[in-house]
Every structure is written in C-alpha cells, then in structure tokens.
Amino acid sequence: MRLLEITSIQRGCVYDGHGVRTTIFLKGCPFSCPWCCNPETQKGSGDFFVDNGRCLRLTGISSPLCDGCERNGGQRPLSSCPVGVCTPTTLTAMDVRKLAQEVLQDKSLFISSGGGITLSGGEPLLQAKELIPFLDIIRQEGVSIAMETTLYDKGMDRVKLLLPFIDEWIVDLKLQKENYREDYLGIMRRNLEILRASAKDICFRLVYVESLKVDEALTALASLEVNTLELIKCHGLSQSKYQKLGMDFKDYTPSEEAYQKFLEALNANNIKTTQLSV
Ligand code: SF4
Ligand code: SF4
C-alpha cells in the first residue's frame, strides 16, 4: 500500500468546505508564495522544524544529553536531539488504511453537519495517484470529499484522475504577479472547463496582499469567469514556522484601507464576496 506525505491532520475545521471537516495537509507545491501560511508543505520530505528555544546548549545549560551532538562539536545530527529541538515536518509515514481509520473517527459529525474530509496543502494534486486508494475507502464510507487546490495542473491528467472522487473543489486563485507561472490563466481556464462540465461544487478563494493590483485582479477574474469569491486578508501568523524552518519571513498583512478598497472594487464589479477570517 502506498504512503502519503502529510504534514498535519486537523479535526473540527469549519472553513475548508461545507459543514465540519477534517483537513489533511499534503506535502509539495508548485508555488512558493512568500506569504504562505503553511511553508512546511513547500519543502520536500526529510526537513525539520528546528526550535532553538528548546536547545539546552543555546540556553546555557550544560547536559550530558548534548554529548556527541553536532552543535556540541560531535557527530550526532541535530535531527537526533533527545530533547526535541528538531521535529519532522512530515508525519510518520502513514499507510492509507491507517489514515482512513484516523479521519473516519469523526464520520458521524461529518454526516450530521454535512461536512467530510478536505485535502489541502501544499498542493494535493501533486500526490493525485497516491491518493486514489485512500479516496476509494472514504468514498465507500459515504463521506464527502473536498479539495483545496491551486488547480495548476498543466497536463490536466491529475485533475481528471481525481474528478470522480472530489465533491467540492475549493480553488485557491493566484493572481499576484509574485505568483504567476507560465500560462497560468490558460491552464486554469482549461481545468475549470473540466470542473464546470462535471457540475461539481466549485468555490474560489483569494488571499489578498497589497501588491495585488485591482485592475489586474479584475481582468484575471473576468477571464476565469469568476463572480463569487471567498476573500482572505493575508496575515503574518505563521512567522514562527518560518523561523523554525530557517526561511526568511516578511509580513504581508495589508493595510485595512487597501483591503477595504479592494473589497469595494470587487463589489462594484458585481463579484459577490464572502470574507473569511482564517
Ligand atoms: S542535543 Fe544538541 S540540539 Fe539537542 S539540546 Fe543538546 S545541543 Fe541542543
Ligand atoms: S499555493 Fe498555497 S501552499 Fe503553495 S506556496 Fe502558495 S500559499 Fe503555500
């Protein structure tokens, strides 16, 4: 049975699709948005959060536990720290049956709230093939499946592969210049055509950062025929994750004034917007 690369599993989520959901965060992403709130999903497996605040040596405590540690001039890698300075960003390899067993413990809550499982990340499309046996089990249990995705799949094969399993598509739009990839709008239009033809539930999401120009956003939204949007004001709550991953952090939280102007422009152009505070 294939293993999935997962960074975390969160129960009781209410912003990741209809009802109450358990969200599974998968590793890997074709983008590297500098304001990403899950930067641990961007890197490959085998990386660690390093919490220097827990390091005995750095806090001036002398301990035999540190004998042999590379930070103490020894050979033992930091990742083997006995006091937990390093934590892997990937959950212990979990086969799909164990994963299904874990997420299905809230099945009755999913059914009563109209919720289910949500795949997020990172970009779940990158593990499309590996996800199939897991999605098969969830389907057989009659639990709804949502996926938060950039939908950036050049070959369209991953979208087509997952299409029969996903009931609700949450499309995370990347309209900022910092995000653009080759033929972004073309790829999105082709994949959206597939989703729309399938009559699946689709909703669009956009994280607002101040560098996003109103005109560019409106043109892109028109080109993708998007007229309803969940808008998220960017925040800097993930700063500590960046520090623990040794990545540069910049706070992209926009001013309230710029955010409100953007919101007004969307309303003035008949784009129905719901504000999400996540
Ligand atoms: S073993 Fe190394 S990383 Fe862990 S507390 Fe000691 S010096 Fe720090
Ligand atoms: S697409 Fe999402 S997960 Fe990927 S880097 Fe951007 S914000 Fe992070």
Image: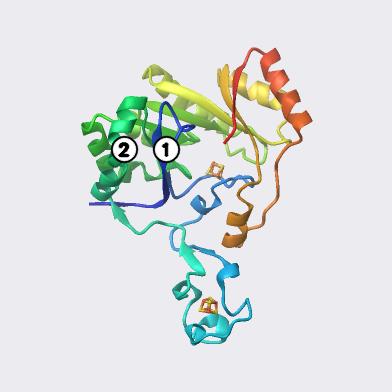
Neighbours of disc 1 within 10 Å: few (<14), some (14-19), many (20+): some
Image coords of residue 265 (percent x, y): 72, 19
- Residue appearing at x 31%, y 42% in the figure: 103
Q: Within the image, what quadrant is residue 191 found in? A: top left
Which of these two is toward me, 99 or 29? 99
- 113 vs 85: above or below: above
> Is residue 49 found left or right of 20 in the rendered image?
right
Image coords of residue 85 (percent x, y): 52, 70
Neighbours of disc 2 within 10 Å: few (<14), some (14-19), many (20+): some
Q: Could you tell me the amino acid type at mark 1? A: Gly
In the image, the residue with mark 2 has its CB under 8 Å from the nearest atom of ligand 2: no
Which of these two is toward me, 106 or 170? 106
- Give the spatial CA distance, label 1 vs label 2: 9 Å
- Residue appearing at x 52%, y 53% in the figure: 40
Which of these two is toward me, 155 or 148? 148
Dot 1 corresponds to which residue? 12
Say which mark, if any, is on residue 216: none
Q: Within the image, what quadrant is residue 12 found in? A: top left
Please say if the residues under marks 1 and 2 sit with CB atoms less than 8 Å apart: yes
Q: Could you tell me the amino acid type at mark 2? A: Asp
- 263 vs 234: above or below: above
Image coords of residue 192 (percent x, y): 46, 24
Say which mark, if any, is on residue 106: 2
- Residue appearing at x 44%, y 50% in the figure: 27
- 4 vs 113: above or below: below
